Amino acid sequence: MSDADVLTTIDSTGRATVTMNRPALHNAFNESLVANLTASLRQLDTDPEVRVVILAANGKSFSAGADLNDMRRMADNSREQNLADAKGIAELMRTLNGLAKPTVALVQGAAYGGGVGLTSCCDIAIATERATFCVSEVKLGLIPAVISPYVLAAIGARAARRYFVTAEIITAGEACRLGLVHEVVANDEELATAAVRITTQLLKNGPGAMTAAKQLIATVSGRLADDELIAHTAGLMADQRASSECREGLSAFLEKRPPAWIKG
């Protein structure tokens, strides 16, 4: 296995897999992992050959969140040093959450702290039955500050009011009920199968339309359906209908052939 803390592969269909690779340390965040993961995601987002981004992890844990060795060191740092570190993690979360391409988290084991944040930032999250989740920061006298916008968007304020202060372990089944993950499978083998299934479905869809659909959610979420929003969404529909991708999709449907964006 490579010594790199982030591994990236791209297959011939446009599936990119980004794998956290600090298994001995439960894929805990340190400065290098955070920087390399952010850089990998940004690069994939600008790669025209990439259609879908999968976030995975090597080892028995998805991510334990902050590296405790780093946390010990940071306790003696200045506020400016701690702020720089916090901004790095915040930028990682913002980058993943704002990726133009569909993202899928494959959670095979424990996801604590920042690991819950990564899960929440992905469009689709699939977990094995042995996966567990914990917003664990208060156990260390911390708060889940930089992950909070994304975790709240996933589970809602009411559930967050419990789990942010209790730091309880959340089972995969409960995480699914809360909306943190979309699907629970039995084991790692079924997780790999589910990843192929869901990404195959994504690859059938217009890449530009999926990006626009993600932007639509960000635009509409939390807003009232007033005249301004209705006019804006009508304009989005009109613009998309006039796009070359839409014309190709409609032509392919009527001609009973795969659209040009489906490889092979």
Image (tube, rainbow, N blue to C red):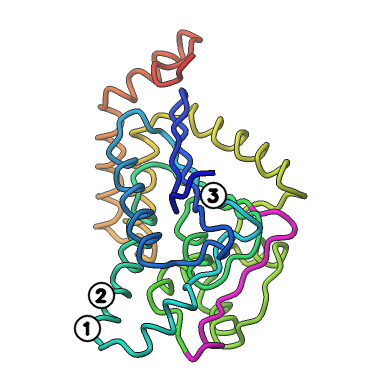
Q: Residues within 10 Å of mark 3 (few under 14, many from 20)?
A: some
Residue at (40%, 38%) from the top-left corner? Answer: 210
Measured as percent of width and height from the top left, residue 98 is found at 34, 54
Stretch in magenta: 127-141
- The CA span between labels 3 and 2 is 26 Å
Measured as percent of width and height from the top left, residue 208 is found at 33, 33
- The CA span between labels 1 and 3 is 32 Å
Is 170 inside the magenta-drawn segment? no
Q: Secondary structure at mark 2?
A: helix
Q: Secondary structure at mark 1?
A: helix
**Residue 80 got which mark?**
1
Residue at (52%, 88%) from the top-left corner? Answer: 140
Name which residue type carries label 2: Ala
Is 138 inside the magenta-drawn segment? yes
Q: Which residue is mark 2?
A: 84
Q: Which residue is mark 3?
A: 56
The answer to whether the residues at label 3 and label 2 have Cβ atoms under 8 Å apart is no
Residue at (35%, 60%) from the top-left corner? Answer: 225
Q: Earlier in the sequence, mark 1 or mark 3?
A: 3
Name which residue type carries label 3: Ala
Residue 197 relative to residue 220: left or right? right
Q: Secondary structure at mark 3?
A: strand
Question: In front here: 204 or 227?
Answer: 204
The answer to whether the residues at label 2 and label 1 have Cβ atoms under 8 Å apart is yes
Residue 31 relative to residue 11: left or right? left
Q: Residues within 10 Å of mark 1 (few under 14, many from 20)?
A: few
